[in-house]
Amino acid sequence: MTVRRVGSEERLTTSFPLQAYAFEGSPRSVERAKEFREYLPYNEGNRTLVVEEAGETRAAVSAIPMRENLRGRVLPMAGVAGVVTHPLARWQGHVRTLLHQLLDEMRDEGHQLTALWPFRPSFYGRFGYVGLPLRRTVSLPVADLAPLLRADLPGEVGWERIGAGYPAWHEFTERCLRERHGFALFPDYRAVALRDRNERWLVTARVGGTVTGAATYRIDEHGGTLAADDLLATDPYARSLLLQFFARHIDQVATVRFDVPADEVPELWLTDLEVHVQARVARPGSSAPMARLLAVDALTGLPVGPARVRVELTGDRWLAGVYLLDGTTGALELARAGAGGAPSATLTAAGLSGLAYGVLDPVEVHLRGLGDVPADAGAELRRLFPRRLPYLFADF
Ligand SMILES: CC(C)(COP(=O)(O)OP(=O)(O)OC[C@H]1O[C@@H](n2cnc3c(N)ncnc32)[C@H](O)[C@@H]1OP(=O)(O)O)[C@@H](O)C(=O)NCCC(=O)NCCS
């Protein structure tokens, strides 16, 4: 058995066929294999590792070099995708071997975070990942947006196909990356797939020429649904401009649908709004994302609350060690800790990641078996890492 990195063209005969078997209906026509070539440019800079036995590909994993905002700092993040083992080679440890090597290499290249969309969270829990919230899908009758039609809102709306509007979209998502906790973006070679497919409309809210909100969308049919992807808005004015634009479809579609971050509360946006908000997590088809720290250095300099705590990080290939987390200046300082001094907790990688990403309270870390957190250390950790819901945005 050998593990090796495959280059661009080699994906056509190694990782892509395995991925198609695992994630698509099959068997497909031979024409399908010809389409693989079209995906190559969007995988160009990915790191793909495969296990081979007797010249046959038995398993594959890939990492996309992405960037993610962690509590205000943008850090390199390894987006793990295309995790697959040949049906005759499953349960033999291939993915364990590949994931370890993949994350070792991505970490060596400076990726301090990693995220993925799991088929089963407990599988990736073994690798130190912790759950993040799933975006909410909002559906509402377009007629209920009618009160917005005559609202006088500051700013204007831009409308075009994504193929034409891509530069404005790209610039705006870069702003979201800088400003929104948890927000992650693809590298350019992958992000441009949206532009190249050109299968979406783009609506933007603008104030003085600056984009303050945006959504890509499709309309399925007359009298049907205006289905948007993520409704991105930097403030309620931008959100209202986008909703006002949707309201203009009042005699064209029946329903408007879009996704929002988990901390949005659409039922408070308008009076008499009939709204359905859903997050559905199911195995294996519909998962919430997961993430973890790949290097403790990801914490250095993070804006945090004023607290000090000693943490022993256990059972992890990438994070193990004893550290003093010192937030007394407001920017986290990290030092190798000696004994004594600050209150002390023991954390797994998932436990520390849950705190840093703002998704778990120290008590929950303890309850979930992700650490041993005495009350005094819990109080310090809660002050250091206040709850803050991340919004991953990228889907991969
Ligand atoms: C899921 C999949 C990738 C696992 O690959 P694999 O090579 O069989 O995994 P490994 O043998 O390396 O298993 C790693 C660990 O997970 C366990 N495991 C394997 N498959 C599992 C499953 N389906 N559910 C839960 N645990 C599983 C193994 O027992 C092993 O645990 P251990 O290290 O504590 O002994 C493979 O079954 C597959 O290709 N499935 C279809 C595609 C898919 O769902 N991919 C994941 C997309 S996110």
Image: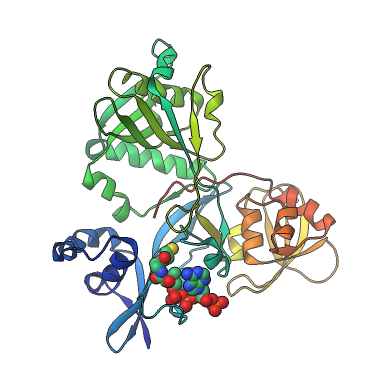
Q: What is the quadrant of residue 16 in the picture?
A: bottom left
Give left or right: position of 175 versus 314: left
Q: Which colour scheme appears in the figure? A: rainbow
Work out which quarter of the rendered image holds the N terminus and state it. Answer: bottom left
Q: Is residue 20 visible?
A: yes
88 versus 249 height, above or below:
below
288 versus 7 height, above or below:
above
Q: Which residue is drawn at 59% across and 75% down?
A: 317
- Residue 365, percent from left and from top: 70, 58
Give left or right: position of 207 versus 162: right
Work out which quarter of the rendered image holds the C terminus and state it. Answer: bottom left
Tag count: 0
Q: Which residue is drawn at 46% across and 57% down?
A: 117
- Residue 312, percent from left and from top: 73, 69
Q: Residue at x 62, y 44 (%)?
A: 388
- Residue 221, percent from left and from top: 24, 30
Q: Which residue is drawn at 22% across and 42% down?
A: 198
- Residue 9, percent from left and from top: 21, 71
Which of these two is toward me, 48 or 13? 13
Which of these two is toward me, 247 or 108? 247
Q: What is the quadrant of residue 369 in the picture?
A: bottom right
Q: Can residue 207 be seen in this view?
A: no
